[in-house]
Image: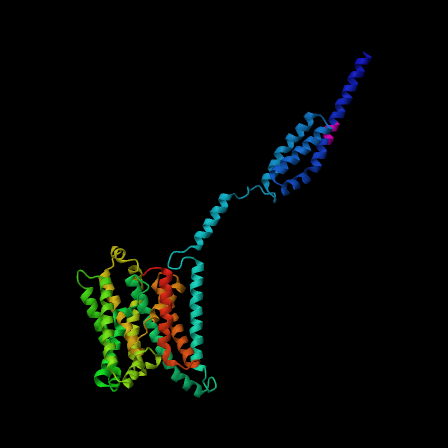
Amino acid sequence: MTAHHMRTTSRLHADAAEAAHAEAVRHDLTQTRPEATADREAAAPAAGAGSEAGAGSEAGAGSEAGVGSEAGSAEAPRASAAARSGPAGSSSPAPSRTDHDRADRGRTSRDRQSGPLPGRRAHKRYWLIFSALCVLAVLITFGSLAYENPMPVGSRGFWLIAEMRTTNLVVVLVVAFCQAIATVAFQTVTNNRILTPSIMGFESLYRLVQTGAVFFIGAAGLVAVTGLWQFLLQIALMVGFAAALYGWLLAGRGGNLQVTLLVGIVLGGGLGGLATFMQRLLTPSEFDILTARLIGSIANADTSYLGVSIVLAGTAGGLLWAKAGTLNVLSLGRETAVNLGVNHRRQLIIVLLLVSVLMAVSTALVGPMTFLGFLVAMIAYQLADTYDHRLVFPIAWLTGFVVLAGSHFVLKHLFYAEGSVGIIMEVVGGTFFLVYILRKGRL
């Protein structure tokens, strides 16, 4: 009996000791839980699971296996909840890759815009280039008025000299407008960016008129073709020539633009050949006088022509500018334009007639400049980087003014060769034409 009582007492003491040890283990785990949570926040979920296993094994080493496993299992839900809560302890789940992709697509769709300038970057680039061209134009204008002006800036004498130089700048502005607008519109309706309106024979007809006047009348013939009415007559001849050509080859049922261009090239070559033949029969003095008129030069312009030139160029160019939307459709090709409801042949003839007016004004005002339009249009396409003619026309006009006025300033004030602007334009424009053809690899 006594032995049985002793065994019972020892068993009770052992149970009490085990219970006290288990309670101590639970207390230790409770105290170390913040440290484990911090570790799990800094480490990956897998590392957190490893630390839980380590804590469970330590608990099992100091107690019964059942107690250790119970403690580990009790801590597992808390650990997984802490891992899901994230570093800030919030209960919201971390954003997934799908959420990031959706946000990126949203930002991309907001950046994209419909229209000729897609995206904020394209808008910023266009207006930056436009502003830079405006600044260059202002600097060239001020340099042309102030460079080598002996009078103090702002004085009466300064403005008198500047007023005399302003005439050349107005001529440059008109010529740049005519060449830029005419070439861009012509390349649009022909769907070919290497063509210029000069191939239609305007300049050859101008050379023939000037040469014929000297050939039949002599050196005084140049005086006979000088004057406002003679200026208007030359414009009327060139526009009438173009109207007859377009009416003959485009107005009929079998009208073809390619055939029209080829006929224009052939007629231009024939008129140029006839002018060259008459030039060979001139005396050396007459030939020298004529040559000065046949080379494009700002000095050839007469101030009495500016009023009429501005009106004609402004009217024709303004109508083309108003047709910018139609030109955008025509640039898509004949079939697409017809499917969109555009009377292709009618619009083609109208555009070509307006182009002929611009080219006639430019040629009669300063003489032929074959590659100026091509050079300006090529640079404008690269700078504007858009199909919309509302945006291409201003860039082309500013580019033409910067190129022509800058060339005139350099040749006049640095090389003292003001009359060589047309020659420089031919050389530079022809070089760019060859480079463009070689890079493109085809006509």
**Rendered location of residue 269, percent (x, y):** 24, 71
**Rendered location of residue 110, percent (x, y):** 44, 53
**Rendered location of residue 362, percent (x, y):** 30, 75
In the image, taking residue 338 as reference, residue 416 lies left or right, namely right
| Residue farthest top in this picture | 1
* Residue 105 visible within the image: yes
> Taking 162 as reference, is 262 above or below it?
above
Quadrant where the C terminus is found in the figure? bottom left
* Residue 397 visible within the image: no
Residue 392 colored magenta? no
Q: Which segment did they paint magenta? A: 20-24
**Rendered location of residue 6, percent (x, y):** 81, 16
| Front-most of residues 429 and 357 | 429
**On the image, which quarter does residue 306 sit in?**
bottom left
Count of numbered badges drawn on the protein: 0
The residue sitting at 33% across, 75% down in the picture is 175
User: Magenta region, mostly helix, strand or loop?
Assistant: helix
**On the image, which quarter does residue 368 sit in?**
bottom left
| Front-most of residues 354 and 26 | 354
The residue sitting at 43% across, 78% down in the picture is 410
The residue sitting at 35% across, 62% down in the picture is 388
| Front-most of residues 54 and 395 | 395
Rendered image coloring scheme: rainbow
| Residue farthest left in this picture | 253
Quadrant where the N terminus is found in the figure? top right
